[in-house]
């Protein structure tokens, strides 16, 4: 078949075949390309989309990028069921099978060391968010700064609303109180996240702390305080999940999210 070669992952040979219905990027089923003691899982992709110039343009197209990432992840997820793959970066492309084999030859020792380290292990992700419900605080402050009067019975104000300041001194005192409350909330969140990470690290062979997620990109509610990955033996994953579940209600106003099991992206140490 003509076209470029898209490489999803490198792994050791595995006996259980992938589903015949599995398709990857460009709707093409992945195949195995063997070299010495390694297997590259590859697919054929069209040059008009994946040659250097069109690919560079596509990577600026969020819809195209999202669809490609989903197809890539579908293959990695299927591989993770039957093997311990070393996933390569999205859109890793070579001219032909020979180019893939050359890459495997050049990096064989590093691939084998990493695969030994990842064998029988999966990655779990844990995120902690500070919930940020809407409150009347902002509108109250805007009214105060503008010097406007709110209508209606002041006794009917919700209990959670701060009292309307009647002077500049009252306003500053209220703002200081709000600032202290905000700081205390973050201190509690950071302390909870620190204790949670220490607990989970005791059940993991390796850990990685990633930068907090950007809410505008992730579209997750709340503010991300902890964004961590844990390398866990597959055989101990059930115990790890139960440990995370037991922490979820330990701190009001915080949300703990668990994702996985994934191929060990955070621990591969491979850039392509």
Image (tube, helix red, strand yellow):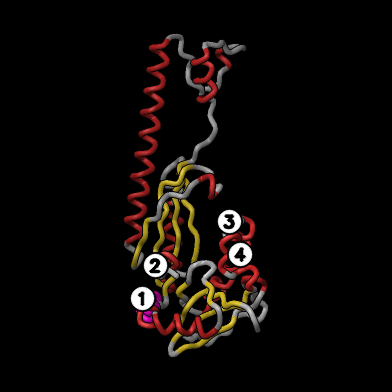
Q: Which stretch is magenta? A: 112-118
Give above or below for 132 relative to 202: above
Disc on res. 49: none
Q: Residue at x 65, y 84 (%)?
A: 1
Q: Nearer the viewer, mark 2 or mark 3?
A: 3
Q: Which residue is identified by label 4? A: 54
Q: CA distance from mark 1 to mark 2?
A: 9 Å
Q: Earlier in the sequence, mark 2 or mark 4?
A: 4
Q: Nearer the viewer, mark 1 or mark 4?
A: 4
Q: Residues within 10 Å of mark 2 (few under 14, many from 20)?
A: some
- CB atoms of marks 1 and 2 within 8 Å: yes
- CB atoms of marks 3 and 4 within 8 Å: no
Q: Residues within 10 Å of mark 4 (few under 14, many from 20)?
A: few
Percent across and percent down for residue 25 are 62, 70
Q: Which residue is identified by label 3? A: 60
Q: CA distance from mark 2 to mark 4?
A: 30 Å
Percent across and percent down for residue 74 are 59, 69
Percent across and percent down for residue 227 are 42, 53
Percent across and percent down for residue 92 are 51, 71
Viewer-closest of 159 and 130: 130
Q: Earlier in the sequence, mark 1 or mark 2?
A: 1
Count of numbered labels shown in the rendering? 4
């Amino acid at each position: 078949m003509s076209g470029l070669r898209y490489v999803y992952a490198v792994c050791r040979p595995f006996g259980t075949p992938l589903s015949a219905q599995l398709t990857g990027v460009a709707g093409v089923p992945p195949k195995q390309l063997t070299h010495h003691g390694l297997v590259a899982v590859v697919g054929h992709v069209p040059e008009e989309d994946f040659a250097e110039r069109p690919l560079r343009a596509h990577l600026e197209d969020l819809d195209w990028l999202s669809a490609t990432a989903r197809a890539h992840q579908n293959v990695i997820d299927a591989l993770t069921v039957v093997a311990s793959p070393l996933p390569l970066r999205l859109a890793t492309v070579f001219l032909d099978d020979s180019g893939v084999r050359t890459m495997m030859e050049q990096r064989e020792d590093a691939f084998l060391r990493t695969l030994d380290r990842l064998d029988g292990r999966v990655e779990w992700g844990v995120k902690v968010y500070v919930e940020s419900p809407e409150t009347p605080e902002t509108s109250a402050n805007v009214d105060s700064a503008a010097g406007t009067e709110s209508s209606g019975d002041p006794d009917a104000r919700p209990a959670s609303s701060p009292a309307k300041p009647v002077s500049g001194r009252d306003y500053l005192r209220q703002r200081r109180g709000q600032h202290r409350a905000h700081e205390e909330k973050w201190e509690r969140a950071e302390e909870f996240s620190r204790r949670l990470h220490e607990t989970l690290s005791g059940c993991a062979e390796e850990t990685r702390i990633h930068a907090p997620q950007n809410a505008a990109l992730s579209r997750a509610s709340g503010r991300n305080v902890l964004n961590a990955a844990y390398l866990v033996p597959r055989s101990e994953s059930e115990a790890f999940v139960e440990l995370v579940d037991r922490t979820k209600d330990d701190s009001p106003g915080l949300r703990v999210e668990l994702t996985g099991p994934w191929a060990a992206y955070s621990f591969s140490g491979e850039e392509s």
